[in-house]
Amino acid sequence: MGRRVVLGLVGLGVVGVALGDRLASLTAGVTSSVAPAVNQILPAAGGFRIYTVTNGYPEKSIADYRLVVQDRDRRVTLSYEDIQQMPQTTFTKDFQCVTGWRVEDATWSGVLLADLLAEVGVDLAGRPLRFTSFDGVYTESLTADQALLPGVLVATHLSNEPLSREMGGPVRLVVAPMYGYKSIKWLDGIQVTSEVVPGYWEERGYAVDAWVGKSNGRNDEPVT
Amino acid sequence: MPRFSRAERWVHWTVAILVVALIVSGACLYFPFLSGVVGNRNVFKWLHTAAGFLLPLPIVLALMSAAFRADLGRLNRFTPQDWVWFRRSRRSDVEPAVGKFNAGQKLAAAVTAGALIVLFGTGLVMYFGGVFDDGLQTGATFVHDWVSLAVSVLLGFHIAKGLADVDALRGMTGGDVPAAWAQTHHARWAAEMSADGGDGPAQELVLRSSDERDRPPGTDAP
C-alpha cells in the first residue's frame, strides 16, 4: 500500500512535468485574477523570480540616483527627475526568462531608450551600447538596431508603481523582445562602444542576441 | 526498549541535514524577499545542487541495514486497522493498538518518499536544463516548486510532532524509547517486542512473506 502511494506520487509528478507548462500559466492566470499579491510572494503562482549575483540587492534612493550616458568624451549625467521629464511610454508585455518562467502582461513605464538617446543628443550611427549596473557586477549590451526598437525601455515603473529595489529600481532596462537577462537591473550607466562587449550572462554562455524563442536553444512563443 | 538501530538513526540525521540544507538554500534561491536579503545566488545554487545530488546516497547505503529494510516493510504494509486509526475520534484518549508505526506515519513516510523522488527527478531536469524540451523544463520547475512547498509543510508537522513528544524523539536520538510510551502509542509493537525479546524474527517474517503483507491484524505476531 505504501509502495502504491509512492508510485502514485511519482506518476503524478511525471504527469505534472508533462502538463506543467500549461498548468503553470493556468495557475498564474487564476492567482493574478483572484489574489494578485500572492504572485509577489510565491513565484510558483506566476510572479517574478528574483536573481541577484551579488550580496543582496544594491540600494539607491531616488534622490541619489544618477544615470551616466557616455559617448566617447561626452558625458551626460541624468537624475531620476531628468528621466521623468522625458517623453514617457507605457507598454504591457510578457516577461520571459531563459530558465523557462514567464510573467504574463507586465506593465512597464519609463522612457524608450531611443527617446532617451535622442533627448541627450546621442546618435549611435550603428555603434552598440554597453550597460552597467550599480551592483558593480552586472553588465549588458545591445547593438544599435536592437537599442532603438520600440520594446526597449529605460523603466522606472512596474504596474504603475515605482520599481522596487528587488525589481531593479529605481531605474532598470527592459528589453521586451529578449530573454530577461538582457533587462539589466539597477541601471547606472549607458556607454556607446565601438563594438559589442558581451555582458555578465553572455560571458557565462548565454546568447548575446537573446531573442525570445530564437536563441539559447529555446523555442518559447514570442512575447506579446 | 530499542526502537531505531544505529544505522537507521544515522540515515535519518544525514537525510535531515541534507533536507534542511536543501530547504534553506532552495528558499534563498526561490523567495524574492529572501534572495534579496542573502544574495550570493551562485553559492546557494552550488549548495542546493550538491545537497540534492548527495541525498540518495545515505538512503541507498541504508538499504544494507536489515533493520532499515525491516522498517520499510512495516511502513509499506497497511492493515485494516490503519483505516480504523484514520477514522478514530480525535478526542478519544484511547489510541487504537497499532504496530511499530501508526497509519499516519505510514502515509507520511510514503508521501515523503514519493515527493523526494519527484523532487530529485525534476531537479535533474532543471539542472541539465538544456538537454530537455522547453515545456518539460517549465513543467519540472512548476512541479518542483509546488512539491517542495508541500514537503516543507509536511516536514514542519514532522518536526513539531517530534518536539511535542520527547519520548518519541528519544527513539531517533539515543535509539531507545520508554516501555510505557511504546505500550501507550504502539501497543502491538510493544507486545511483539516483549513476546520476542527482540526485533529480529518479526522483521525476518515481514521481509520474507510479501504475500502476507495485507493480512488482517492479529495474525502477524509470530
Image (spheres, coloured by chain):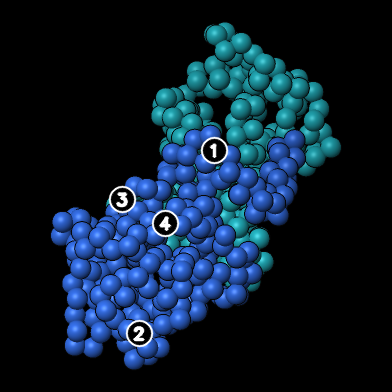
Chain colours: A blue, B cyan
Q: Which residue is mark 1?
A: A33
Q: CA distance from mark 1 to mark 3?
A: 22 Å
Chain for numbered disc 2? A
Asked if labels 4 and 1 touch by Cβ distance under 8 angstroms, the answer is no
* Circle number at residue A90: 4
Nearest to the observer: residue A145 or residue A209: A145
Nearest to the observer: residue B3 or residue A184: A184
Q: Which residue is mark 3?
A: A162
Q: Are marks 2 and 1 on the same chain?
A: yes
- Looking at the image, can residue A78 be seen? yes
- Residue drawn at 56 percent across, 69 percent down: A212
For marks 2 and 4, the one nearer the N-term is 4
Amino acid type, callout 2: Leu
- Residue drawn at 46 percent across, 35 percent down: B156
Asked if labels 3 and 4 touch by Cβ distance under 8 angstroms, the answer is no
Q: CA distance from mark 2 to mark 4?
A: 24 Å
Q: Are marks 3 and 2 on the same chain?
A: yes
- Residue drawn at 55 percent across, 9 percent down: B91
For marks 3 and 2, the one nearer the N-term is 2
User: Looking at the picture, how far across and down is residue B10, in whole percent?
Assistant: 48, 48
Amino acid type, callout 4: Thr
For marks 1 and 4, the one nearer the N-term is 1
